[in-house]
Amino acid sequence: MNFLLIIGGLILLILGGNWLLKSAVALSLKLDVPKIVIGMTVVSFATSAPELIVSINAALSGSSDLALGNVIGSNIANLGLVLGITLLLGTMHVQKSFYKTDWPVMMIASILLYFFLSGDNVIARNEGIILFSFLIIFLIYLLRYQKTAVLDELPEDDEPLPLYKIVLFLVIGGLGLWGGSELLIKGATSMALEYGVSERVIGVTVVSIGTSVPELAASIIAVLKKEKAISLGNLIGSNVFNILAVLGITSIITPVAVKDIGILDNDIYWMLGISFVVLPLVFVPKGYRLNWKDGIVLLAAYIAFIYFTV
């Protein structure tokens, strides 16, 4: 039964990722917005919806380690697992906005989370408000200034869609991702609990991989359709959203406290390390690109994280 839930969830997530990407590309054409901006706003928000739903549910039911583990684990999985696998499928050219805006914002958000947690082992309501306010400022900056700053190449086969179709694909895609992740988490968590694993470990492994499957589906589909700007923007944007929106909104609703100290002793350092290492990978040995070798490095880092955590 759990196995069927996992398979059904995966199918829904892949379909949802495809519909979401379709609407994102059409939206970028309609609004004349660079695809990387769409990737970091519309697609990121929709693919972060499972994390948001899971984290709010977990925090409200007293499972704050699951909420924190889910976000920290998802951020590690997005860069280690998802970007790693995506790069094995092909080289990704990186735009200047990556190191001028996107990566620094992701690092600031990650460091803010570290300081908020290491002080008193809790993200209080006022800290949640700071995180969410930072997200609003970042989005306003993106939409006002990065619109013209990003060079964008449209593949020949992009076709504009009428507005009702864009909204329809966006809603269906979002619902597919949400429903799929619910099924996946239900099946995977039940399986993990059978083996008596702790809440934090379930959060940073099973649940975080489950909620990162939308990013994986959206990114692989983006790469196969040659929409690589959306792919990298989606992953970096998703990590920013996970911290600033998911933990920001969750901690505004109810403070998120650390119960299992492993989150502070192990998990958060892996998140900071993998987030940081993406920058040197972009420039070494040749600038502005990530290839299959970088993919192997990121995947190896993710496998090491899972090994030392479990």
Image (spheres, helix red, strand yellow):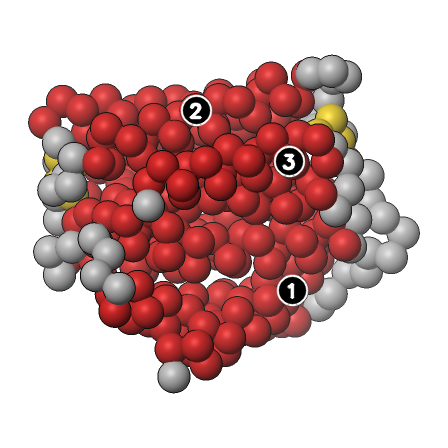
**Marks 1 and 3: in contact by CB < 8 Å?**
no
User: Circle 2 is placed at which residue position?
Assistant: 273
Residue 88 % position (x, y): 71, 43
Lateral position of residue 110 relative to residue 257, left or right: right
Of the two numbered discs 2 and 1 in the rendering, the one whose residue sits closer to the viewer: 2
Q: Residue furthest bottom?
A: 1
Residue 29 can be seen in this image: no
Pick whichever of labels 2 and 1 is earlier in the sequence: 1
Q: Distance between the residues labelled 3 and 1?
A: 25 Å
User: Circle 1 is placed at which residue position?
Assistant: 18
Of the two numbered discs 2 and 3 in the rendering, the one whose residue sits closer to the viewer: 3
Q: Is mark 2 on a helix, strand or loop?
A: helix
Closer to the camera in the image, 176 or 207: 207
Classify residue 34 by image quadrant. Answer: top right
Closer to the camera in the image, 124 or 268: 268
Classify residue 248 by image quadrant. Answer: top left
290 over 210 or under it: above or below: above
**Marks 1 and 2: in contact by CB < 8 Å?**
no
159 over 92 or under it: above or below: below
Q: Is mark 1 on a helix, strand or loop?
A: helix
205 over 286 or under it: above or below: below
Residue 203 % position (x, y): 30, 51
- For image coordinates 21% across by 54% down, the residue present is 199
User: Circle 3 is placed at which residue position?
Assistant: 296
Of the two numbered discs 3 and 1 in the rendering, the one whose residue sits closer to the viewer: 3
Lateral position of residue 245 relative to residue 142, left or right: left
Pick whichever of labels 3 and 1 is earlier in the sequence: 1
Amino acid found under the numbered disc labelled 3: Ile
Amino acid found under the numbered disc labelled 2: Gly
Q: Is mark 3 on a helix, strand or loop?
A: helix
Amino acid found under the numbered disc labelled 1: Asn
